């Protein structure tokens, strides 16, 4: 030992997720990972690379392309007392397992009168921005946020990527974690000593007084960019990272709106009947008399996400649109 | 007695602007009331004839007490004198949803007369409909005892487009939204418009029931009332605050020279004026001497966490406001300049934000551009200090025994002796002087 | 089949240690389920039970026969036609009645109803309303048992309709691939709701389809409780010994409607009558009578015993309280501080 304190090494979002899983696998023998190509391949997005060598094929379990079967098997194993982490390659594929997630994972505890708890964690990639076209790019986390009985998380920062898994595994009920595909290569340093994330709280990523930009996941960076540009014009934007899409942290959201009196919701999901609609409704229901402008929404265009770069960019929320919406709100 | 603020429990009637027998219309200003914070005009929400004034000027009554009786129909329908709770001036415009407001206007129902059965006494749609049907059956089922109440006549013109927050703040302050010009999308009244109206920075011709402002071309009675309101505030300041005054002359040679060099490199539109340096120095000095930056409360002096520099702005056509430059000590002179320009423009356009009118922690008044060399101001309660800046003038000035011509400014300090002593004030002026000798560090 | 039936009958004559005929338990189990279901018809008709109620009258041999092969440590996952499975597993009739009456004393506290009976203490993991939806969960229960080296197996009941669902095929593949200790019981009553098997499946030999996944699969007469028991015991033993999943197709028939009442437009009355000739209870009684294992007094005794139990059960179930509506949201999530 030299006694010299090592500088924190830069890590990627992907590595932060992996480190969280490694820690969970090492700390609790009930934890195992299962999903398509999580073992030998190292995960479709490389998140589980190297874990097979460390923990063996029983706990880093490659599955057939059977989303319904392996998600359901995760549910059964969780009921039996294990703590499975099930990786579904993307949210689009998760629709093949939606029966299991909705009709079983989210439902069994209540339907059985409190007897059957399902301590399951499901991870999946969501979101666009990598020219993967319509069947690999959608943001359907809002659909999951509709379902009572599950907790829905969207880590948008390295720290959340690293520290959300442990509390998710400690949750006695199902948790679905959405990792935005554009974030895997984001790198930075993790503050040392950070602990588990409080899964009930949204985070104010940037305080401000003139308008609240409310977002999560892959749109957080865009909202922060927009806030910087607004600051140059003298508009002081507050940026709220929801972090947990269900249950929503009403106190933080409405506390912010009570200070700024203006809200812009940024959601990569579609506008119609989506998460942004829920947020706008809650703000109107609970914060109506605090509002000094209509709630603005910046969402994905109502179109299957296309392949061509310029079309894809046009389909997604961008900082320009967020700035424009904030300006409309501020007037 | 209307509730004119969330924390108001009683108010003092200062003046009646109407007399028994006068006809009043909805929205007319009928009285001036002194709350704990300011003198505020009271408007009436009911048309009719002033039957009787129940409270004499100078009398303090609790919120909710009747101030006067206004009859809306024939004299025999007037409430008996004993009924002190007869509707006169409602506590505040009721908080209702846009739908209910719309419905009421459509059906000609005056919401101020409707009992709210919803949460927190909120008027619901069914309350309005009940009011409509009661009115109809009374008119149709019995010999008409009186003409239909004037207040139920549909209000002419389109309904006011206003944000929920603007409605709420207006209702809490008893301000009629119809008198406010909206600057939002489609002319919507936003809270900034309401606050501007309340702080008196509204365009001429509009009511401005707040202290610290005198608006030109207002009706004579109202202008008098406002003059009186300002007078009362200043009188209270002089009555309650033991002012002490200090003065010093500051050499601006270094500052003006530095500015000249700087401005040479800047396009005309970005050039700085000495006022930017003076304000910055005033703000930094306030941070150095926190005993002068804050407010006097029941618990004594409470220092402010930041320096929000109130800047006295004279309005075109007369009147004065002193809105805040937030966090002035943290801004560069260039930013200060830009913010000041924006603030003055908005103050004169009546578009100040609420926080700007309520947040100042210390105020600077400058009458230099009017040729005044020294100004000894009256402190704005609850602040505890006011800095006066005069005109920058050239004077013979000795430096190290050498006489030369230097630009100088007279800086004064009016301070609250309850919060500080002369020595503290002296430190403030000394700091101001020192800071202005190193303009490049500002 | 005839020869095998005769062999079963001979085996059935073997006396238990206490001297009673073990077939009497099978008979009592089936009669109990039959009479229970008949009470459901009454309670439904009088409006005390509402919602969907799927009766298993005619299919009693499946529940009773398979349960004989299970131990209390085994897991059971089943379908919405599960009153028989629940009763055979040992869930008290009173708790099942109470559940259908919507009482807090019901085995799912009145939140599940007829289709969603649960009793985790008896490792009975529900009553699943989605056809084939329980199969992946059963695979997970089996996986957990295997990963922990526990000797138990997971028994999953499903109908013939489930073989048209992807979830069956995904699960069959997964279970065979991973050698899971899973006993797959296909209760083939020939109709997926109103669609006859020949209009549902291109290949109606369901066991053959299961076998294609590399698991052992065979078809059994599901109206013969002795045959069911024997097959289930063999399969369960193999599964416990690490033989991977086994698939049994139990050919049976429901005598009543899909749900409580339907007009039976999709099948011939004569077909129903033909199957009633093979009523599993009559079938067993006849054989027991034939070899002296049952007399009329004995049968009356069983009937009386069952009737008294069900009278008491209905009476007790009716006394159960109702969950206060303030508890509506309870169990959506585990309350904070309550470990799972």
Image (cartoon, coloured by chain):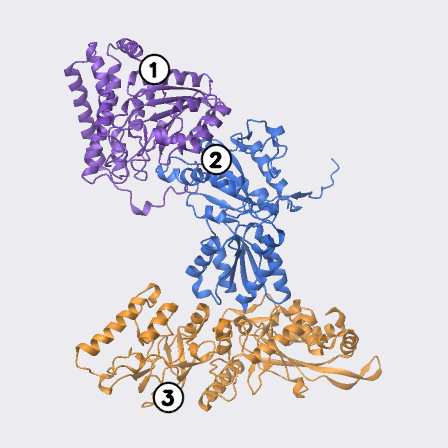
Answer above or below: position of A324 versus A69.
below
Q: Chain C appears what colour?
A: purple
Q: Chain of mark 1?
A: C
Q: Position of residue B236 (x, y in %)?
A: 50, 81
Q: Residue at x 30, y 16 (%)?
A: C226
Q: Which residue is mark 3?
A: B18
Q: Chain B appears what colour?
A: orange
Q: Which residue is mark 1?
A: C230
Which numbered marker is on residue A71?
A: 2
Left or right: C135, with C253 as reference point: right
Q: Position of residue C301 (x, y in %)?
A: 16, 19
Q: Position of residue C191 (x, y in %)?
A: 32, 30
Task: Please tell me in which quadrant of the rendered image residue C17 appears.
Answer: top left
| SS type, badge 1 | helix
Q: Chain of mark 2?
A: A
Q: Residue at x 27, y 8 (%)?
A: C10
Q: Could you give the CA–CA distance between mark 2 and mark 1, rounded to whole angstroms?
A: 33 Å
Q: Are marks 2 and 1 in contact (CB under 8 Å)?
A: no
Q: Quadrant of the C terminus of chain A?
A: bottom right
* Residue A56 visible to an observer of this rendering: yes
């Amino acid at each position: 030992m030299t006694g010299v304190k090592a500088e924190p090494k830069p890590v990627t979002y992907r590595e932060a997720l992996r480190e969280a899983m490694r820690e969970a696998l090492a700390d609790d023998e009930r934890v195992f990972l299962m999903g398509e190509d999580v073992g030998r391949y190292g995960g479709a997005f490389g998140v589980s690379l190297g874990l097979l060598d460390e923990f063996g094929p029983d706990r880093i379990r490659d599955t057939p392309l059977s989303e319904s079967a392996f998600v359901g098997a995760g549910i059964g194993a969780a009921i039996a007392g294990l703590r499975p982490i099930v990786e579904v390659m993307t949210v689009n594929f998760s629709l093949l397992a939606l029966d299991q997630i909705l009709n079983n994972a989210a439902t069994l505890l209540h339907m059985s009168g409190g007897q059957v708890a399902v301590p399951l964690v499901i991870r999946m990639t969501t979101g666009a921005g990598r020219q993967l076209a319509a069947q690999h790019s959608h943001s359907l986390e809002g659909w999951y946020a509709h379902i009572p009985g599950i907790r829905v998380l969207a880590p948008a920062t390295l720290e959340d990527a690293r520290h959300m898994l442990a509390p998710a595994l400690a949750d006695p009920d199902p948790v679905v974690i959405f990792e935005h595909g554009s974030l895997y290569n984001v790198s930075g340093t993790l503050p040392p000593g950070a602990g588990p994330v409080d899964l009930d709280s949204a985070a104010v990523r940037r305080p401000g007084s003139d308008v609240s930009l409310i977002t999560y996941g892959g749109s957080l960076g865009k909202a922060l960019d927009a806030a910087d540009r607004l600051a140059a014009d003298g508009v002081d934007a507050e940026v709220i990272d929801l972090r947990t899409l269900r249950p929503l942290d009403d106190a933080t959201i409405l506390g912010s709106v009570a200070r700024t009196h203006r809200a812009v919701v940024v959601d990569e999901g579609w506008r119609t009947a989506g998460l942004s609609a829920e947020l706008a409704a809650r703000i109107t229901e609970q914060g109506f008399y605090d509002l000094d402008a209509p709630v603005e929404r910046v969402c994905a265009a109502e179109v299957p996400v296309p392949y061509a770069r310029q079309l894809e960019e046009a389909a997604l929320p961008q900082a320009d649109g967020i700035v424009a919406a904030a300006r409309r709100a501020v007037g | 007695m209307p509730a004119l603020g969330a924390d108001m429990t009683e108010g003092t009637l200062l003046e009646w602007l109407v007399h028994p027998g006068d006809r009043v219309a909805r929205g007319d200003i009928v009285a001036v009331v002194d709350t704990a914070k300011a003198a505020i005009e009271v408007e009436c929400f009911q048309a009719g004839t002033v039957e009787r004034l129940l409270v004499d000027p100078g009398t303090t009554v609790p919120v909710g007490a009747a101030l006067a009786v206004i009859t809306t129909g024939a004299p025999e329908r007037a409430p008996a004198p004993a009924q002190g709770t007869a509707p006169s001036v409602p506590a505040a415009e009721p908080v209702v949803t846009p739908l209910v407001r719309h419905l009421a206007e459509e059906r000609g129902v005056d919401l101020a007369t409707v009992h709210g059965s919803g949460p927190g006494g909120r008027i619901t749609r069914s309350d309005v409909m009940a009011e409509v049907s009661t009115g109809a059956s009374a008119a149709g089922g019995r010999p008409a005892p009186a003409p239909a109440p004037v207040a139920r006549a549909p209000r002419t013109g389109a309904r006011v487009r206003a944000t929920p927050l603007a409605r709420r703040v207006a209702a809490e302050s008893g301000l009629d939204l119809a008198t406010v010009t909206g600057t939002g999308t489609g002319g919507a009244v936003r809270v900034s418009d309401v606050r501007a109206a309340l702080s008196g920075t509204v365009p001429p011709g509009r009511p401005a029931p707040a202290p610290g402002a005198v608006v030109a071309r207002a009706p004579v009675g109202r202008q008098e009332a406002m003059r009186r309101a300002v007078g009362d505030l200043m009188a209270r300041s002089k009555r309650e605050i033991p002012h002490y005054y200090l003065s010093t002359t500051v050499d601006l040679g270094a500052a003006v020279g530095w500015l000249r060099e700087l401005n040479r490199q800047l396009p005309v539109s970005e050039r700085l004026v000495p006022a930017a340096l003076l304000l910055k120095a005033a703000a930094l000095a306030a941070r150095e001497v926190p005993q002068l930056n804050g407010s006097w409360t029941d618990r004594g002096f409470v220092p402010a966490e930041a320096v929000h520099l109130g800047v006295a702005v004279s309005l075109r056509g007369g009147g004065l406001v002193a809105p805040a430059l937030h966090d002035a000590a943290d801004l560069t002179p260039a930013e200060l300049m830009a913010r000041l320009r924006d603030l003055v423009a908005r103050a004169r356009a009546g578009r100040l934000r609420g926080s700007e009118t309520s947040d100042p922690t210390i105020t600077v008044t400058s009458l230099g551009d009017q040729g005044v060399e020294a100004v000894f101001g009256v402190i704005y309660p609850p602040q505890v200090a006011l800095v006066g800046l005069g005109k920058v003038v050239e004077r013979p000035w000795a430096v190290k025994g050498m006489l030369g011509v230097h630009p100088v400014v007279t800086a004064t300090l009016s301070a609250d002796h309850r919060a500080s002593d002369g020595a503290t004030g002296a430190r403030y002026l000394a700091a101001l002087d020192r800071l202005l000798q190193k303009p490049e560090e500002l | 089949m005839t020869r095998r039936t005769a062999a079963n009958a001979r085996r059935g004559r073997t006396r238990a240690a206490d001297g009673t005929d073990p077939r009497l338990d099978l008979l009592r189990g089936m009669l109990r389920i039959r009479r229970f279901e008949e009470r459901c018809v009454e309670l439904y008709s009088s409006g005390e039970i509402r919602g969907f109620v799927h009766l298993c009258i005619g299919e009693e041999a499946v529940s009773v026969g398979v349960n004989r092969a299970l131990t209390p440590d085994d897991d059971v996952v089943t379908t919405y036609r599960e009153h028989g499975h629940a009763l055979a597993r040992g869930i008290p009739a009173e708790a099942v009645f109470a559940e259908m009456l919507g009482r807090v004393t019901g085995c799912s506290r009145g939140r599940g109803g007829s289709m969603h009976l649960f009793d985790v203490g008896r490792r009975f993991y529900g009553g699943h309303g989605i056809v084939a939806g329980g199969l992946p969960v059963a695979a997970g229960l089996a996986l957990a048992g295997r990963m922990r080296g526990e000797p138990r197996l997971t028994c999953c009941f499903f109908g013939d309709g489930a073989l048209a669902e992807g979830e069956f095929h995904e699960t069959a593949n997964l279970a065979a691939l991973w050698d899971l200790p899973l006993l797959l019981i296909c209760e083939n009553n020939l109709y997926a709701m109103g669609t006859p098997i020949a209009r549902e499946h291109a290949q109606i030999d369901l066991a053959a389809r299961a076998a294609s996944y590399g698991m052992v699969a065979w078809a059994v007469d599901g109206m013969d409780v002795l045959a069911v028991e024997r097959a289930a015991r063999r399969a369960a033993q193999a599964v416990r010994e690490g033989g991977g999943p086994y698939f049994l197709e139990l050919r049976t028939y429901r005598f009543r409607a899909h749900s409580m009442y339907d007009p039976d437009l999709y099948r011939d009355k004569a077909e129903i009558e033909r199957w009633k000739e093979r009523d599993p209870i009559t079938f067993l009684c006849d054989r027991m009578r034939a070899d002296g294992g049952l007399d009329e007094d004995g049968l009356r005794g069983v009937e009386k015993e069952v009737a008294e139990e069900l009278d008491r059960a209905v009476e007790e179930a009716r006394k159960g309280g109702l969950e206060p509506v303030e508890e509506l949201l309870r169990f959506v999530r585990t309350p904070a501080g309550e470990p799972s």
